[in-house]
Amino acid sequence: MKVLLIDRNHSILQSGLEKIGCVCEEDYTSTKQQIEEKISDYQGIVIRSRFNIDQQFLDKASNLKFIARVGAGLESIDVDYAEKRGIHLISAPEGNRNAVGEHALGMILALFNNLKKADLEIRQGKWLREANRGIELEGKTVGIIGYGNMGKAFAKKLKGFEVEVICYDIKEGVGDENCKQVTLEELQEKIDVLSLHTPFNELSYQMINSPVINAFKKPFYLINTARGSAVVTDDLVEALISKKILGACLDVLEYEKLSFENLFENDSFPEAFDYLIHAENVLLSPHIAGWTVESKVKLAQTIVDKIDALFFSRETTKTKSEFKKVTGIGGLFFKSDDPAKLKEWYKKYLDFNVDDWGSTFWWKDNNGKSACTQWSPFKRDTVYFSPSTKDFMFNYRVENLSALLNKLKVEGIPIIGEIEEFDYGKFGWILDLEGNKIELWEPKDVAFLS
């Protein structure tokens, strides 16, 4: 498979693609028109945000099998037309979600504690303690709009701060142990902090405007690490002046160019932007929430893994009869009226070695390696089993989660959400024919031994 790389990325992207059998060529300088003239020679293209891939470009790409974007969104691609042409679209929100979660948390903590203002004052010889008295995150309600990879990463970071975390999303059943899904009306009723984690689309475009802002019951703080186009800046400034919005953390601005590499199309500064750069209760960063040393590696590797699963591992699984779907039971999850008391009962009477999650049972796999199965009671009101209404959920161990989910999707099995990756493995979810939610786990057992 011949692949064209048109944006610079971490070197493991090219080396990883070549390792699985791709022939990679680089072109970081040609114009879009020049690339259109030769794109028919390639089966794959890897981009970041250099230019739009529109219908005209796709018409020229007669042999294209996939477009991979090294980032979270696909807004620079004519998605509908690409899918109509049978072209696979690949993005990598798993690669920078942790970075976004940390950045969002860092911005709100910096704003709450006046860190930018205090730092600048000290550099000017001012030692103003009372004027920089901060506020605490603890006890507040944080609302998240858009509970996908980025929203979930932020909620996970908030777990130790003793806050209530709620979310609104157009998809049902996305809440989990870290966040309760609510209606938009309930979110507007309760929150003290609002964090945006929506992709770019028609629904998210300018969704934070004066009518929406005024529908919130309490004054609130705004965090936007999603897309600048989600917020009408003029309306934001109006709300900051009226103190309906108490402060804003903005990693993205609606004035950005599509490539995200520059701020303005021309040298004129909008009046609203002039207000933002002089406001003490506004914290700005140049679209870098997902822009860490680690995420650069993760994004590249995620793209390689997805291309491998889609075009190479899947082909291997068709020819290898020894491919295993499920290799063992990874966990037994069930609802309980009082998980803490139940765990203590099992510890006292059946000698379970319990922890915050339940109890871990160790065994040896067919290769003699240490492997584990998790036993976990969940609170009765958990939404982790959603959309299933059952009181239990099974976790099954698998060898190649991406390849398996791709195969199941082709076979018409309902896939719930996106793959999520942690230090202890990758997770995906499906529904069986009776509506039971099944968790599939590609484990890294060694993480439990460290």
Image (tube, rainbow, N blue to C red):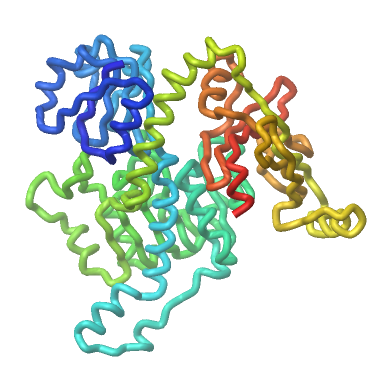
| Residue 251 visible in rendering | yes
Horizontal placement of 400 versus 113: left or right? Answer: right
Query: Which residue occupies the foreground of this view, 122 or 328?
Result: 328
Looking at the picture, how far across and down is residue 247, in whole percent? 36, 66
Determine the residue positioned at 21% across, 48% down.
255
Total labels: the figure holds 0
Looking at the picture, how far across and down is residue 405, in whole percent? 55, 24
> What is the quadrant of residue 404 in the picture?
top right
Toward the left, the furthest residue is: 267
Determine the residue positioned at 24% across, 63% down.
276
Query: Which residue occupies the foreground of this view, 154 or 141?
Result: 154
Q: Quadrant of the N terminus?
A: top left
Q: In the displayed structure, would residue 107 be above or below residue 424? A: below
Q: In the displayed structure, would residue 386 be above or below residue 242? A: above
Query: Which residue occupies the foreground of this view, 231 or 13?
Result: 13
> What is the quadrant of residue 339 in the picture?
bottom right
Q: Quadrant of the C terminus?
A: bottom right
Determine the residue positioned at 17% across, 49% down.
263
Q: In the displayed structure, would residue 355 be above or below residue 426? A: below
Looking at the picture, how far across and down is residue 28, in whole percent? 15, 32
| Residue 437 visible in rendering | no
Looking at the picture, how far across and down is residue 95, in whole percent? 41, 42
> What is the quadrant of residue 54 in the picture?
top left
